[in-house]
Image: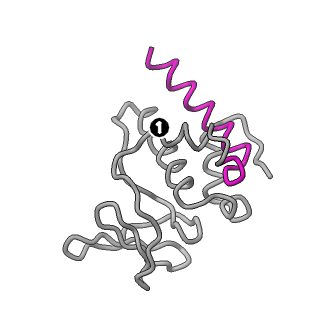
Amino acid sequence: MSYQSDDDRDVASAWLTKPELRSHLNDQLAQALEAVVVNQENEALGGPPNHTPFSYCPVCGEELTESGTDGWVKSYLCKRKHKINERGSRLWTAEEELCSAMSPDFSYQVLESFATRENLKRVVPRQVSELLLHILGARRRHSR
């Protein structure tokens, strides 16, 4: 299973938004991949990396829109009406089901482990692993 494009952002976006591809990504990998896309887009515009934890629904992969704040809890909705709440490093659905606990800081070390660890190869699609390695390599070349 793969998506054909020469643009890393197009490939990453396809894996995040196309249900037939998104269904092969676990939530943590999808969140890390989404953070890469957001950071690349923001850096391409000359801005600092964006630390928004996520923009896609961890339930279905649809794009999220902020729907309000209640005290310390920020809420989001996707097109399919999944309500996702966020506070700190916790995400959960309106039904109180925990979706994920994630680091509030983006980590390229997490991406490298997704792309290179042998025991993760069965859960990381080959094209996504190759994409992550390409992004990490470009980032290293750029930072020298």
* Residue 90 image-quadrant placement: bottom left
Quarter of the image for residue 137 reads top right
* Residue located beneath label 1 in the image: 109
- Residue 10, given in percent of the width and then of the height, sits at 64, 44
Magenta residue check for 103:
no
Label 1 element class: helix
Q: Position of residue 109 (x, y in %)?
A: 47, 37
| 8 is higher (above) or lower (below) than 119 | above
Quadrant showing the C terminus: top left
Picture residue at 34% right of the left edge, 68% below the top: 86
Number of numbered discs visible in the structure rendering:
1
Relative to 75, is 118 above or below? above
Q: Quadrant of residue 106?
A: top left
Q: Which residue is most to the bottom?
A: 95
Q: Residue at x 44, y 19 (%)?
A: 143
Outermost residue to the right: 1
Three-letter code, disc 1 = Gln
Say if the magenta span includes residue 134: yes
Q: Is residue 79 left or right of residue 95?
A: right
Q: Residue furthest left?
A: 71
Image coords of residue 18 (percent x, y) = 68, 60
Determine whether, in the image, residue 31 is placed left or right of residue 129.
left
Give the residues drawn in magenta, as a range: 120-144
Rendered position, 140 above or below 53: above
Q: Nearer the viewer, residue 88 or 119?
A: 119
